[in-house]
Image: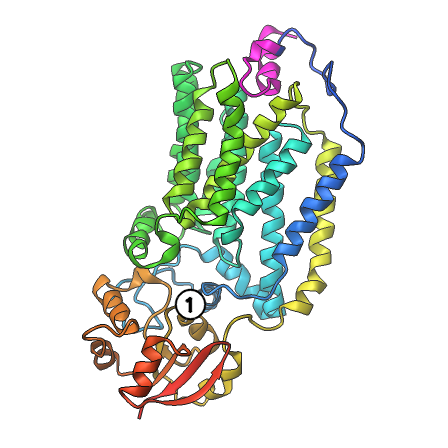
Amino acid sequence: MTEQSKHAIASVTAGPGQDATTWQSKPPSREPAGRRRDPRWLVPALAVFAVATTVKLGIRAVSDPDAWWHLRAGAFLLSHWRFDGPDPWVPFSSRPFVLTQWLPEVVAQKGYQLFGLPAVAWLRCAAMLALISALVWAGRQAGDAVPAIIAALAALIGAGGSLSERPQLVSFVLLAITVGAWWKSAGDLKPRWWLAPMTFLWACSHGMWGVGVLVGLAVVAGLALDRRLDRRTAARLLAVPALSIGAAALTPVGPRLLLTPLEVSSNASQFVQEWQPTDARNIFAAVTLAMIALALLPWIRGTSARPWWQIALAGSAVVCTLAMFRTIPIGSIIAAPLLASSLQEQRGHPPVALSRRGAWAWVGLTTAAAILAMPIAAAVAQAPSGWPEGLRPQLAAIPAKTVILNDYAAGGWLLWAEPQLTPVIDLRSEIYSLGYIRQYIRTEQVLPGWQTLLHQTRPRYALLKANAPLTVALREQLHWSAVGQDAGYELLKAP
């Protein structure tokens, strides 16, 4: 074996915080000398527990407010195959609607057409199984199976506030794969060229694809600070994020896709809770920060210098966790291999490479879980959860094109449940002007000038939260009459 080959193996198997040469004199082995064996039952038990927990969290009725307009968007694209243009549903929008998340929307809509809402619920569960698998794989780049599964479960809990039936689940899976790939590249300094075509699929699925590019740049910058890169190696590694950006520009949306995340955030950050700074009391943020703290604890106690590329990832995880509720899962996913690495360090030996047998065992376990989830989804997800399905007969009797003054969160459900009606607003905040959104909030909170939106949109009905300020004002000040109530919503009719 050449000295170069020995160093490559040592780079991959060296424990967190250890120089690769520490293990160079030892022969590569599936069972390093001095390694304490885990009980034979431990890894299978942890694996079954992780997969069972994922299925338990993943199988439930469809409830997310955004899921409904995503289904409507999928149906629109299947019918028209148009990715942008004036919004076809809400005439009060003033900006083009760009279908940047079209691939999972189409898949979900096709599933719904074939099998109804249970298919949407099952797709969410299957994506979560893919996520726990990607997290375990990323953790295995830094630790043995036990630390990797523990870190993956912690990351799944940290991301728990965002694990709903939305395209962003695809982002979480692909981000975990990206983080694991860059851990491998940090070990052997080889570019993973397949990240570029994967980014193409990512950019067709969700706007968070740029995070993968930033992770790559952070790792390369850290490796440069560690003085591990010559010009040729640095150029090859930097080519991966550059090609990824180019791949994103080649999606059906075209180069404008590169700017759409900025367009969405410019509106959403002011009005949508998940785009606002993280609340320190948020349980998912607390779990993620605890992960990061546990990962950093051996760093603080240790005497050896930590590689800059790991410090860059740790800093990125902290920033993402604290930036906004929406990015807490990003922090937890980036932190997963960091935690696995620190847990591995406590074991006192370098991680053992993932065997083909172990990989296929995991694939078999998750496949069996996905198959088992099908009848469960059919049993529990036949109807939406948390939405006024009991008002569907009254809503269906309203003449087509009638404008409905709706609760903000219910706009997507209305677009899906009663597509013949016209809500005044929905959760796609990027298609509305800031002035229109502010006027809606003024109306919702019954602030001075609240009736301006009514004169502008001329709604004949209202679907609002029962006893909300606007509901009370419509009844008591403008004498709107109640038509019915269900699931905490009230349907009102103008006099």
Image quarter in which the C terminus is found: bottom left
Residue 18 is covered by the magenta coloring: yes
Is 383 displayed left or right of 217 in the figure? Answer: right
Instruction: Report the front residue among 444 and 385.
Output: 444
Q: Which residue is mark 1?
A: 80
> What residue is drawn where x is 61% and y is 56%?
58
Residue 404 in view of the camera: no
Disc 1 is placed on an element classified as helix
Q: Residues within 10 Å of mark 1 (few under 14, many from 20)?
A: few
Amino acid type for the residue under numbered disc 1? His
Q: Which residues are magenta?
A: 1-22
Above or below, 396 relative to 79: below
Q: Quadrant of residue 97?
A: bottom left
Q: How is the image coloured?
A: rainbow
Front in this rendered view, residue 87 or 12: 12
Where residue 142 sits, quadrant-wise, is top right
* Residue 112 percent coordinates (x, y): 57, 68
**Left or right of residue 19, residue 96 in this image:** left
Residue 422 is covered by the magenta coloring: no
- Please report the residue visible at 68 percent of the width from the left and 32 percent of the height from the top: 145
Q: If the image is split into quadrants, where does the N terminus sit?
A: top right
Q: Is residue 463 above or below residue 215?
A: below
From what the image shows, is residue 478 above or below residue 15? below
The spot of residue 493 in percent (x, y) is: 36, 89
Q: Residue at x 47, y 19 (%)?
A: 307
The image shows residue 215 at horizontal and vertical percentages of 43, 34
Judging depth in this view, the residue of 329 and 347 nearest the camera is: 347
Q: Give the image location of residue 7, x and y in percent.
A: 58, 11
Q: Residue at x 75, y 21 (%)?
A: 36
- Where, by quadrant of the figure, is residue 240 drawn? top left
